[in-house]
Image (tube, grey):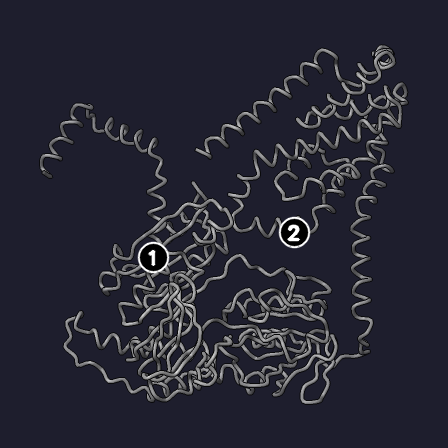
């Protein structure tokens, strides 16, 4: 009902706009609003102004506002008339305020009629564009107002699609249009000598206005230069540099940064205080996915009867499983080793790095001067200030891999990706797992149905899922250690032998000098960076977990390319970080993968979308492998196949999401996926079938009905015969 009212109101506004145009056209046709007509009727008009000055000024003001508001191209003649009839001072005041009021009304009408449509179809790119316009919109508007070759009505319409504030639009338009207003009003006082309005736009005048338009940008650049000069003045700049680049941290982002710099023949130093490969290799991706695979093998053997195999329940040798985890780390480690990077030409230093100035990094007491610095220090687990936790002892995603004995009772604090993955793995290995989550559901960044799906799968596999539980303390009781929580205003306790803290990770931003340099942090404690990953100091960059907003290995590697290239070549060419497409995978079984927008985010930011689903239960390969739990869900622009985002829940979802990421990155719609040949039988066909479901929902029914008639005509079949055929078919089926 609300949508109907809004549509009706837009129709009314459009109708009023049409009436305004019609009124002005009638006035123009009766009075001939042209330069020649103005010349011939000037004396009569002057007499009218002299007889009724206030009424004449008010009438002129109203006509000018209306003409500007409906964007009719008669403002030039009206401006000349303002000078001819009211003089320079009064004419300038009338025209200046009337033109600004009319332009503002035109902007508001454009915003009301069209902005919602544009926001809907611009998708996820609109917020980024709006942030840029909020920052620089006044400068753009002022420059456009000063350039006479750009029609003002076009500026009004386009401005309505932006988030520029009404007050800002008013005063910038008033100031920006004033020079041209003065020129034309003054010309109106010399009406007899003017043969055409275009005579006013001399090359000198246009050049002057262009110079005036550029002036704010030059002033802004000068202020930025002065700010940087003050920022750097307390740091002496070396006359020569030891390195082109120093990279702090040898995790995923730091390794990519050092590799790329060496490939580009820059002299680069990579500093790491602990182990090469960072968290991903040593305590994150590699060990966790190895353990998850071992746990899945145990589960598959335990449930082999569903494939017709009689087996005995497996006995899990947890110590052997952990040895396999360490073996996997050792097998991958040479890819990230000191030796490999030194062979590439990277100067690898073991030790603690401290940034002494924007040009100097100290490692082991030895200073290294450098033209640029990339900070890739990673993140570390968050440990809550929970009474009794430290005394009882706890595990994190970093210390878990030293455990040799499988905990009989494992409590996991945190229902995010890490908590869910490890809860399922340890339950399959034989632990009694209790998963405690403070929020109302697991995986709070995913859609509600995805959270419910994962919670159900965990519960089926023996995990005791407890949501809406606030951890209060760790206490010792008759059953040993217990996690005490508050739930529904009651205290409950969950005994455990080991507790894993998995409530998130916080960027490492302390201990290497950014505090002394005054580099700021965001509310999420990441280092403040701009769209080029620059910090407060333009030659210091940050990437990976320490820069956010993601904490993925692939996101860190993606950002490292931009940070490194901008650090090495920023004075020549800079590259804005492409944040449009970033897939994420939670490695529970079945997996959860997502890229782009989901319904939760769509509702939150007001994006209009259309949902298309395909269930794994209809996929041949999933049926063959008894892996029918899951679905593909795609969000598109309403009525179009443009992909806003996709969520895949099911077997091999992490691999399936890559096709949607590729399609979004290269702006390939669902029609392109549908037209791509997918091998049969594969899980990847789920993506194609989802695209097919979208196509069926948007089939051109009218064209198909005409096509049906054409086929019937070619068969020489009458409608009566067709009706009897349908009746016979229905009778046969019955």
Q: Position of residue 169 (x, y in %)?
A: 71, 40
Using the rendered view, name the quadrant where residue 300 is placed: bottom left
Residue at the limit of the structure toward the front, as seen here: 490
Residue 450: image tag:
none
The residue that appears at 42% across and 83% down in the rendered structure is 400
Q: Which residue is label 2 attached to?
A: 132
| Front-most of residues 709 and 54 | 54
Q: Is residue 475 above or below residue 30?
A: below
Q: Position of residue 473 (x, y in %)?
A: 44, 76
The residue that appears at 67% across and 62% down in the rendered structure is 574
| Front-most of residues 15 and 267 | 15
Residue 678: image tag:
1
Q: Is residue 604 above or below residue 638?
A: below
Say which label, 2 or 1, has the lower sequence index.
2
Give left or right: position of 426 versus 155.
left
Q: Is residue 606 visible?
A: yes
- Tell whether label 1 touches label 2 (CB within 8 Å): no
Q: Position of residue 533 (x, y in %)?
A: 64, 65
**Badge 1 element:** loop
């Amino acid at each position: 009902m609300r949508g109907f009212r809004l549509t009706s109101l837009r129709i009314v506004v459009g109708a009023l706009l049409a009436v305004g145009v019609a009124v002005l056209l009638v006035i123009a046709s009766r009075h001939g609003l042209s330069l020649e007509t103005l010349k011939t009727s000037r004396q009569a008009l002057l007499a009218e102004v002299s007889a009724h000055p206030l009424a004449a000024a008010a009438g002129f003001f109203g006509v000018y506002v209306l003409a500007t508001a409906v964007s009719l191209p008669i403002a030039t003649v009206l401006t000349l008339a303002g000078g001819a009839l009211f003089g320079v001072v009064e004419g300038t005041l009338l025209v200046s305020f009337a033109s600004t009021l009319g332009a503002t009304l035109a902007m508001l009408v454009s915003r009301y009629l069209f902005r919602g449509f544009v926001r809907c179809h611009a998708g996820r790119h609109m917020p980024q564009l709006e942030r840029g316009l909020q920052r620089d919109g006044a400068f753009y508007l002022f420059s456009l107002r000063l350039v006479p070759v750009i029609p003002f009505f076009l500026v009004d319409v386009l401005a309505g699609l932006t988030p520029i504030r009404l007050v800002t639009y008013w005063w910038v338009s008033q100031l920006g249009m004033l020079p041209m207003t003065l020129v034309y009003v003054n010309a109106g006082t010399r009406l007899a000598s003017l043969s055409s309005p275009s005579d006013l736009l001399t090359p000198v005048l246009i050049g002057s206005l262009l110079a005036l338009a550029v002036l704010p940008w030059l002033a802004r650049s000068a202020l930025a230069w002065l700010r940087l000069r003050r920022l750097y003045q307390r740091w002496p700049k070396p006359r020569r540099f030891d390195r082109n680049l120093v990279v702090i941290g040898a995790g995923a982002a730091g390794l990519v940064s050092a590799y790329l710099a060496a490939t580009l023949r820059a002299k680069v130093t990579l500093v790491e205080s602990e182990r090469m490969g960072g968290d991903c290799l040593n305590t994150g991706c590699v060990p966790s996915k190895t353990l998850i695979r071992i746990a899945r093998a145990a589960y598959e053997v335990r449930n082999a009867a569903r494939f017709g195999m009689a087996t005995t329940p497996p006995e899990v040798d947890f110590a052997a499983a952990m040895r396999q985890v360490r073996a996997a780390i050792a097998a991958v480690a040479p890819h990230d080793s000191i030796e490999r990077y030194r062979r590439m030409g990277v100067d690898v230093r073991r030790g603690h790095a401290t940034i002494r100035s924007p040009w100097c990094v100290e490692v082991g007491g030895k200073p290294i001067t450098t033209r640029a610095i990339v900070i890739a220090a990673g993140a570390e687990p968050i440990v809550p200030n929970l009474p009794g936790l430290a005394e009882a002892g706890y595990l994190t995603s970093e210390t878990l891999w030293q455990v040799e004995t499988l905990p009989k009772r494992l409590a996991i604090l945190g229902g995010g990706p890490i908590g869910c993955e490890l809860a399922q793995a340890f339950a399959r290995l034989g632990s009694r797992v209790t998963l405690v989550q403070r929020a109302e559901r697991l995986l709070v960044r995913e859609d509600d149905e995805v959270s419910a799906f994962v919670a159900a799968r965990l519960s089926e596999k023996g995990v005791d899922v407890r949501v809406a539980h606030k951890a209060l303390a760790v206490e010792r009781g008759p059953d040993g250690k217990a996690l005490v929580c508050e739930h529904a205003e009651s205290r409950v306790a969950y005994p455990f032998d080991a507790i894993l803290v998995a409530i998130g990770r916080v960027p490492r931003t302390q201990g290497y000098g950014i505090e002394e340099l005054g580099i700021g942090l965001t509310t999420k404690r990441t280092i403040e960076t701009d769209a080029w990953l620059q910090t407060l100091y333009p030659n210091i960059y940050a990437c990976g977990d320490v820069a956010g907003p993601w904490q993925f290995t692939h996101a860190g590697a993606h950002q490292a390319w931009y940070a490194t290239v901008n650090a090495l070549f920023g004075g020549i060419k800079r590259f804005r970080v492409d944040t449009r497409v970033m897939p994420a995978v939670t490695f529970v079984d079945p997996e959860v993968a997502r890229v782009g927008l989901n319904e939760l985010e769509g509702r939150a930011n007001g994006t209009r979308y259309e949902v298309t689903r395909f269930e794994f239960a209809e996929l041949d390969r999933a049926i063959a492998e008894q892996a029918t739990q899951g679905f593909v869900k795609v969000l598109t622009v309403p009525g179009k196949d443009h992909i806003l985002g996709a969520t895949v829940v099911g077997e091999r979802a992490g691999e399936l999401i890559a096709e949607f990421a590729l399609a979004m990155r290269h702006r390939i719609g669902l029609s392109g996926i549908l037209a791509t040949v997918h091998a049969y039988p594969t899980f990847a066909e789920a993506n194609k079938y989802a695209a097919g479901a979208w196509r069926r929902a948007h089939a051109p029914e009218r064209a198909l009905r005409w096509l049906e008639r054409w086929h019937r005509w070619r068969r020489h079949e009458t409608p009566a015969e067709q009706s009897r055929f349908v009746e016979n078919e229905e009778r046969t089926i019955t």
